[in-house]
Structure formats: C-alpha cells, structure tokens
Image: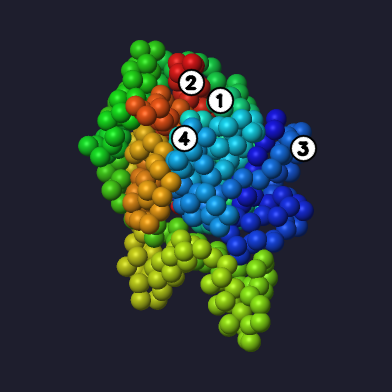
C-alpha cells in the first residue's frame, strides 16, 4: 500500500516541520511507532503531507508553507489540519494516508474531500513520535478511499506500545472481519442537540436519507440527548490551548529547529526564535493557554474546563447505555472558500462543533462520504462509537458505503 504521512509524525532521517518555520530544518532522529509498524507490514511511505501549523486549524491556511487546495474545487480549502493527507488520497496520489486528530483534523478534511477518515479511541494508537499539540486529545488515524482500506491500516498501527504510557493494553481485533454488512438489531442514536436549525438543510437531509437506509435494514434508530453539547467548543479551546502552551514551550531556539541569529543573551534567543518561528494562530493559542493556566485564572478556566470535560464524557456514557453508536454530521458546512474564515478565528473554531466532543470524551469517530450538496461538494457523515469499539463504527460505515456505491 502506498501511504502518505502527515508532517507531524516522525520519520527517521526526514525533515519533520509540522507546517512551522520553527522546525524548518529539523530532521527526525527516529521513527514514530506507527512508521515502524507500517514498515514492518511492507507499507510504502511515499511522502509527507502539508498541514496547519502544529495541527492548529481547520483549513490548512495556518501553514507556513502555503495552503493545500481541495482537488474537487481548487478555490476551496481541503479542511484541516490534516488537509494534505486527505488530498493525497482524494487526488489519487496515495492509497491511504495517516493524519492526526485533536479535535476533528482527520474527520473534517475527510468530509471536505469526499473520502473516509477515522479517529481511533484515545490510547488505541501509539503517539510515540507524533509531535504533541494537546497530548490528552491527540490521536493518529488513517484516511482511505474506502472503509476497508482504513480498517486494514488501523489493524497495522493499533495496539499497545511500551514507548507510549497512554497507549492502552487492549487487544486489537481483526477490523476487516468486522465488516459484515449486517446492521439488523443495531441501536443507533441521533443526538438531538446536533440536529438544530443551525445545521445546513442539505447536510441534514443527506444524513437522514442514510438513516432511513439503516432503518430499512433492521437498525433501531433512537433520539438521544447530549445536554452538554453547547459547552464543547469552549471546553475544547480552553483545554487544548492549555496543553499546547505547555507542549510548545520546548521550542526555545536552543534545542530544536530554528535559532534566531545574533541574539545577545538567552532571553533574546528565546524571544526572537519563537517570535520569528511561530505563526499567528500558534501564538494566539500559546497566549490563550498561558492565560488559562495562570495562577489567577487556573480555577476559573482550566479547572472548570476539566470538570466540563468530565460532564461531556458522562453525556456519552449515558447515551451509550441505550445505543451502540451515534450518527451525526461531520461538519456544519461543506468545504468553504480559501480566505473565507481565515481572519475570523472564532468562526473557524465553530466549524469544529461536531468533531471536538469525540476527543473530549476519548471515543472513536469516523467520517464517510454521504452524497453531495447542490454545488457538487462532498458531505460527510460521522459515526461515533464506544471507547475501543472501532469495530461497530467501521461496520456501519462499510454498510453505508456499499449503499453509496
Ligand atoms: N480544528 C481544530 C483545531 O484547530 C482541530 C485540530 C486538530 O484536530 N488537530 O484545534
């Protein structure tokens, strides 16, 4: 299998830039665990793909090396942050690709480019060698042109790794075997907070059509409630910026990548290396994260964010007592125009509304193609599952895919 790798995953002897000037000439001294596993399985790693700087963004516009174009309409973004990996697969440059997903960065670009993208359960895939954005949210996952390709790659990269203490000691099933084509008796939940007036009509209708197909084949469809949905974006951006500000402290001009020239003392070296090396969005998040972690505001923001995260997780635990998986839109819109949201960070953040909850709760999610809108742009359907139950969401995804064909 010819595989492309997001430029945030370490490959020995290759430059790993994370879309940032600060790592412009950084060469990785080792292979990430996922790379070792792909190599062992005879995967052919063909190249590295462009992304939003340090995986912060939803469009690849926050990249120091330029924006990725959506192959379906080159005036539009491919989604982000793993936009390059999605395009590599959508444009036929690679068979599959790896991305990373902290709040939707695999699922949303998969939706915008009309392909399949899976974010595994937190802990399912080793993060050893994945450059950290928000360590308690980040997870590596595959893109593919079809569900079975994604299932095959997951089988290779998943499983416990002694080099990542957060990787789980949970057996890895044969995901391809779980694609049985049978959905009868399966209980499927539709979270009512996700299907509001704010959701684009065409997206809503496209998803409901698929839900009808499931019903027709014996699935039991129920409405469920995730009452804390309205706090997901706020909790996500407080907690991930906090973690990012801490993770990105290591880029000081002394140890990695870019070093400012002619600095007179160490403080100037740090300040200038970071000011020159990081882009605007990364700086914005470091400032936000530093603020929410500061002594005076820690209780009001960071601690509260942690509590809300727990409540969001409990929403899902409750929902999964009644259903086996949830079906939602992947994104509130189809691919937007390059430049449309880049000057308005808050609008950009709101485009993650349907994806961030899976990372807050640590559950798996997959986005699959679900028809097109009136402009011919792909619509994404998201399936969310219980922790470590990638099998069910892959099964439903595969079933719906055969219906799409
Ligand atoms: N768009 C989200 C953000 O900007 C998600 C990014 C991601 O999943 N890496 O944080």
Q: Which residue is mark 1?
A: 146
- Observer-side mark, 4 or 2, equals 4
Q: Circle 2 — which element?
A: helix
Q: Residue at x 37, y 46 (%)?
A: 351
Residue at the extreme left of the image, as rendered: 197
Q: Earlier in the sequence, mark 2 or mark 1?
A: 1
Which residue position is annotated with label 2?
401
Mark 3 residue element: helix
* Residue at the extreme front of the image, as rendered: 75
Query: At x 58% / y 24%, what residue is drawn?
Result: 148
Dot 2 or dot 3, earlier in sequence: 3
Name the secondary structure under disc 1: loop
| Number of residues whose C-alpha sits closer than 10 Å to that of mark 4, classed few (under 14), some (14–19) or many (20 or more) | some
Mark 3 vs mark 1: give the one in front.
1
**Sequence-wise first label, 3 or 1:** 3
The tag on residue 73 is: 4
Give 374 or 107, whichever is nearer the viewer. Answer: 374
Q: On the picture, is 164 further left or further right than 296? A: right
In the rendered image, residue 345, in percent from the top left (x then y), is placed at 37, 56
Q: CA distance from mark 1 to mark 4?
A: 21 Å
Classify mark 2: residues with Cα within 10 Å, few (<14), some (14-19) or many (20+).
some
In the rendered structure, the answer to whether residue 155 lies left or right of residue 27 reads: left
Labels 2 & 1 near each other (Cβ < 8 A):
yes
């Amino acid at each position: 299998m010819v595989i492309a790798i997001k430029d945030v995953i370490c490959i020995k002897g290759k430059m790993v830039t994370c879309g940032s000037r600060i790592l412009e000439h950084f060469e990785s001294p080792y292979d990430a665990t996922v790379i070792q596993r792909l190599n062992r399985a005879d995967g052919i790693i063909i190249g590295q793909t462009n992304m939003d700087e340090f995986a912060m963004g939803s469009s690849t516009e926050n990249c120091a090396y330029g924006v990725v174009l959506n192959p379906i309409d080159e005036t539009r973004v491919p989604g982000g942050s793993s936009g390059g990996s999605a395009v590599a697969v959508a444009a036929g440059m690679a068979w599959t690709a790896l991305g990373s997903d902290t709040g939707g960065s695999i699922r949303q670009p998969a939706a915008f480019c009309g392909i399949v993208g899976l974010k595994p359960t937190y802990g399912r895939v080793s993060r050893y060698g994945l450059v950290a954005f928000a360590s308690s949210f980040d997870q590596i996952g595959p893109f593919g042109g079809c569900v079975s390709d994604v299932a095959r790659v997951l089988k290779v990269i998943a499983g416990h790794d002694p080099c990542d203490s957060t990787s789980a000691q949970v057996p890895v099933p044969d995901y391809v075997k779980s694609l049985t084509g049978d959905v009868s008796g399966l209980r499927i939940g539709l979270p009512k907070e996700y299907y509001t007036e704010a959701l684009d009509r065409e997206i809503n209708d496209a998803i409901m059509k698929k839900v009808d197909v499931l019903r027709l084949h014996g699935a039991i469809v129920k409405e469920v409630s995730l009452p804390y949905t309205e706090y997901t974006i706020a909790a996500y951006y407080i907690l991930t910026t906090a973690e990012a500000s801490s993770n990105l402290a290591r880029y000081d001009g002394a140890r990695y990548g870019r070093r400012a020239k002619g600095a007179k003392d160490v403080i100037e070296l740090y300040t200038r290396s970071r000011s020159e090396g990081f882009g605007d969005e990364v700086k914005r998040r470091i400032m936000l994260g530093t603020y929410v972690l500061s002594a005076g505001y820690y209780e009001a923001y960071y601690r509260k964010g942690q509590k809300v995260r727990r409540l969001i997780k409990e929403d899902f635990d409750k929902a999964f007592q009644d259903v086996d998986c949830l079906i939602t839109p992947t994104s509130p819109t189809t691919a937007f125009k390059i430049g449309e949201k880049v000057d308005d960070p808050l609008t950009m953040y709101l485009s993650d509304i349907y994806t961030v909850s899976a990372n807050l709760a640590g559950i798996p999610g997959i986005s699959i193609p679900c028809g097109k809108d009136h402009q011919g742009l792909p619509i994404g359907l998201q399936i969310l599952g219980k922790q470590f139950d990638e099998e069910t969401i892959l099964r439903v995804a595969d079933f719906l895919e055969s219906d799409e064909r």
